[in-house]
């Protein structure tokens, strides 16, 4: 464990954390943290992990971005449930001799997003790893009764909407893999690297849609649109058809794909880590959904397909149905 | 990832889990789980990790024990807060090709303890590890207002009590390291291996002491008695003196130490993973504490020292004060 032992790093972690908010009477540093649930609300809980060499590389991404992303991917699960973040816990397995400066930067990236998203860091664990860095993040959120969004709430006939645009993170990853120096990239292409390294969970969108019961189902796109659509259909016991022409492709991803001889649609379907949200909406709730999405404000939504009575997962390319490709595997 | 992909393993995990209890309207398999807090109660949350090669070895412990222990060490933190378990989340990083049979056994060990301790498994994450197995466990507990136990609640003059006896887990680890074949070991010595592999968190003791406000502070002994006492004193801004002769040494640890030329007291002080609880008790609450401990029933408590105005951490050996040794480092 680094130049510092586990206790010293946990203390350091405690110092980097701002004062615990009022709903956290016992924060980091005790055997467990104590959290006061919001009155009348339920708690949403999710855990996610980033593994060095699988989900990130230290040679590609600065520690600050890694810390940001570790929390962002966990918060994206809360966004998909329509929950408001309340707290986070961080469990780190670190190689012997991990530099304290990198530890601090990673923590700062985590803490900055924790502050801005109100996911106060309330618990931590540090262990030695004889192999890669493993970053496990647990997030706690708050959601009112009957206002959360499940992935299995869809039914045949529901319309599918996706937030923002797709393919940017996969393009950013491909740029990193190709070691494209950012000097040769246009601004829209460079932005893909940022999307890959510093995803912004769609927290407000998820909460506003959930609060207004504007969608029947939701899922976040961690492993690509094809995987998300398939999982939603499976959980909802329906089939799914996506319309190729309707899928909003990120401009930078499109440009880069054209230059690199790649296919931007494939980046969107099978490339992971866009962390946009996919919603299933009853046609009679369409207006309410669009109004709520507009109210959320920080993103567009685009209709890209529907859930179907016929089983299977399909891509409609100008009237021709093809099987949806597989999802992204880390 | 094994012969099966991440989704397949998560599904398998979901099947191994019993039906979600009534306070978990959304269990494993969605973006996040939803938990209903107990009426008027707060939530205790803690995360802990076991790393292969650091906290366990696959050649020493069967997968079922590893699964048990991963949850047990996390539950021990809830015990130390006086909280009642309500739910657990499991995040696994597994090497490529990890056998599905071992995965199932590990899960079964986890699930059996989750059932018996009412820590229903409500969330899971599976990632690929290019190195060791990493098992991260988050536990959620329930505790009434002003009934939880912090490690920093002690003051000078408080008496220190420990549950059960100490040194067994460290002796069990030493037996594993020495590859002592269990054929040569007496029953009390073999029991040390079991204590090392399958610790039983003192959940009932912690809850009864907390509910009765019978102790001023508590901590669990994950890294040895010396470390626990030092951390409690530090958090309470006091010194601490432990009486060597009063420390309850496990019988098997004592026997093994005598045979192996080791010191049983050192196993208790500096050996980790006994997962007993250390309490600080105001002298005027002594009777209430002992009555509550008796009510908890499944363990003895022994008075082993006191918190002091004078700073420092000391071991009293027949009137001679020595500095307390360091804690256990994995």
Image (spheres, coloured by chain):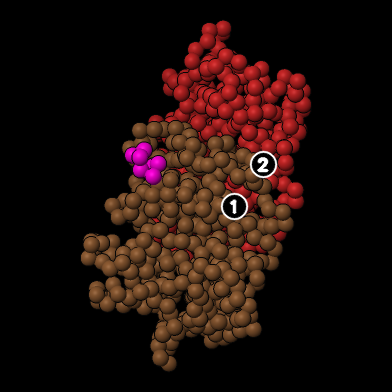
Chain colours: A red, B brown
Could you tell me residue A273's position as x and y percent? 52, 34
Residue B246 at x, y percent in the picture: 44, 83
Q: Is residue A296 visible?
A: no
Give x and y (percent) for residue A193.
50, 35
Above or below B293: residue B180? above
Residue at image position (40%, 58%) is B198
The residue located at (57%, 50%) in the rendering is: B87
Q: Residue at x 64, y 83 (%)?
A: B284
Q: Tag 2's secondary structure?
A: loop
Q: Chain of mark 1?
A: B
In this picture, residue A146 sits left or right of residue A105: right
Provide the secondary structure element on which disc 1 rests: strand
| Secondary structure mostly seen in the magenta stretch | helix
The answer to whether marks 2 and 1 sit on the same chain is no
Q: Which label is found at residue B86?
A: 1
Image quadrant holding the N terminus of chain A, namely bottom left
B100 drawn magenta:
yes
| Residue beneath disc 2 | A83
Q: Quadrant of residue A298?
A: top right
- The quarter of the rendered structure image containing the C terminus of chain A is top left
Q: Residue furthest bottom?
A: B319
Of residues B316 and A229, the one nearer the viewer is: B316
Q: Residue at x 72, y 54 (%)?
A: B39
Q: From which residue to which does the magenta span run?
A: B99-105
Can residue B136 be seen here?
yes
Task: Name which quarter of the figure residue B195 lies in.
Answer: bottom left
| Mark 1 nearby-residue class (10 Å; few <14, some 14–19, many ≥20) | many
Q: Which mark is residue A318?
A: none
Residues packed near mark 2 inside 10 Å, few (<14), some (14 to 19) or many (20 plus): many
Q: Is residue B101 above or below residue B287?
A: above
């Amino acid at each position: 464990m680094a130049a510092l032992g586990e206790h010293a790093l946990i203390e350091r972690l405690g110092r980097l954390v701002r004062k615990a908010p009022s709903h956290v009477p016992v924060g980091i540093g005790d055997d467990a943290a104590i959290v006061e649930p919001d009155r009348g609300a339920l708690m949403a809980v999710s855990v996610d992990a980033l593994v060095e060499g699988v989900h990130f590389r230290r040679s590609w991404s600065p520690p600050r971005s890694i810390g940001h992303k570790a929390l962002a991917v966990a918060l994206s699960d809360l966004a998909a449930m329509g929950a408001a973040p309340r707290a986070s816990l961080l469990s780190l397995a670190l190689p012997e001799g991990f530099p304290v400066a990198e530890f601090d930067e990673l923590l700062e990236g985590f803490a900055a997003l924790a502050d801005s998203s109100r996911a106060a860091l309330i618990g931590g664990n540090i262990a030695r790893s004889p192999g890669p860095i493993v970053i496990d993040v647990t997030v706690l959120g708050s959601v009112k009764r009957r206002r959360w969004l499940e992935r299995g709430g869809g039914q045949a006939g529901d319309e599918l909407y996706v937030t923002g645009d797709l393919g940017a993170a996969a393009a950013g990853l491909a740029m990193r893999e190709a070691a494209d120096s950012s000097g040769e990239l246009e601004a829209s292409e460079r932005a893909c690297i940022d999307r890959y390294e510093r995803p912004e969970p769609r927290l407000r969108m998820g909460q506003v849609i959930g609060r207004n019961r504007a969608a029947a189902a939701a899922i976040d796109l961690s492993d690509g649109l094809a995987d998300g659509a398939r999982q939603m259909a499976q959980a909802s016991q329906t089939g799914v058809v996506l319309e190729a022409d309707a899928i909003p492709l990120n401009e930078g991803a499109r440009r880069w794909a054209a230059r690199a001889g790649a296919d931007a649609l494939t980046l969107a379907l099978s490339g992971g880590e866009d962390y946009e949200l996919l919603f299933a909406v009853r046609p009679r709730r369409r207006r309410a959904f669009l109004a709520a999405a507009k109210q959320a404000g920080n993103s567009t939504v685009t209709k890209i397909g529907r859930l179907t009575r016929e089983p299977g997962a399909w891509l409609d390319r100008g009237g021709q149905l093809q099987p949806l490709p597989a999802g992204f595997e880390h």
